[in-house]
Amino acid sequence: MPVLLTRKIADFPIGNIPLSLHHAGLPDRWTIAGNAWIEETDFSRTESDAVLIDGEGVVLAWRGDGPKVVAEKSFLIRHSWDLLRANEQYLSSLNESDIEGDVHAQAVIDGFVRIGEGTRILSGVVIEGNVVIGKNCKIGPNCYLRGNTSIGDGCHVGNAVEIKNSILLSKTNVGHLSYVGDSILGERVNFGAGTVTSNLRHDGKNHRTMVDGSLMDTGRRKFGTIVGDDVHTGIQTAIYPGRKLFPGTSTRPGAVVADDLTTSE
């Protein structure tokens, strides 16, 4: 996974909170597998001592050597699309807003949001769905954030940009006239004007992506791109669904990314 080449999975932010810290509030004496996403509701179905497993029998968490209990919502993070799934679960659970930044009177918010200190939401911005935005960001004017989207600190999402159900890590810029859907963008990424991610197959089937030289079914009908840290795209870049851009790569203006990009064009 390009976004995990430059950080540990425990440090990857889900809703702008490192994965490891999501586990801090779980019941006492449970041991959590290092790459597991745990929903606390699964513990209500366990005995005082139990082993929480997924549908394939893989251990997610345990306390003592009690009976095995199959998780309903918890799962092991094996692939990049599992990070999107964890982000979706976390953000969909938000039930109140916390706004510390400045929201323009002509911005529209429909859903629960968390907006960090120093962030400016400019005029014409529409936020639809549960969205988390970090500190010192500039959002807008006239952009559309929807789905379960999280945006890190120091990001810029500019004019006529649409971000849907995605994760943007800190100091990333999607300046203007771009679309990012069902995707993950690492730190310090810059999308040139008009960069578009595709996230839907024409036949409506699940997306497949290359993993260790073989095509793997992601189980997702909507899946965009996974972009590592420090990637820059040229203007009017188009990215096929399920493609990965590795850290430090770049594209030329008008590029079409039809295969995983491991070196700059």
Image (spheres, rainbow, N blue to C red):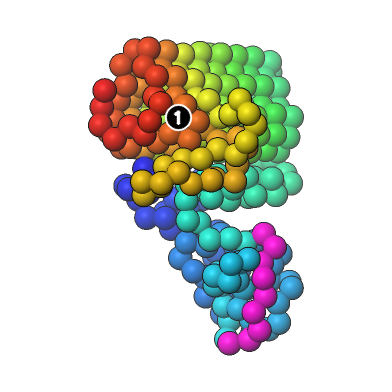
**Where in the figure is residue 22, as x and y percent of width and height?**
55, 59
- Asked if residue 151 lies left or right of residue 55, the reply is left
Q: Give percent across and percent down for residue 14.
A: 53, 48
- Whether residue 99 appears in this view of the structure is no
Front one among 251 and 109: 251
- Determine whether 171 is above or below 2 in the image: above
Residue 242 picture location, percent across and down: 48, 35
Foreground of the two, 198 or 117? 198
The residue positioned 65% from the left and 49% from the top of the image is: 89
Q: What residue is drawn where x is 42% and y is 55%?
A: 9
Question: At 41% across and 30% down in the image, what residue appears?
Answer: 172
Q: Mark 1 points at which residue?
A: 155
Q: Where is residue 189 in the image (x, y as percent from the top left)?
A: 37, 30
**For the stretch drawn in magenta, what is the main secondary structure?**
loop
Relative depth, front residue between 243 and 205: 205
Residue 33 located within the stretch drawn in magenta:
no
198 lies left or right of 236: right
| Circle 1 SS class | loop
- Left or right for 179, reference 173: right
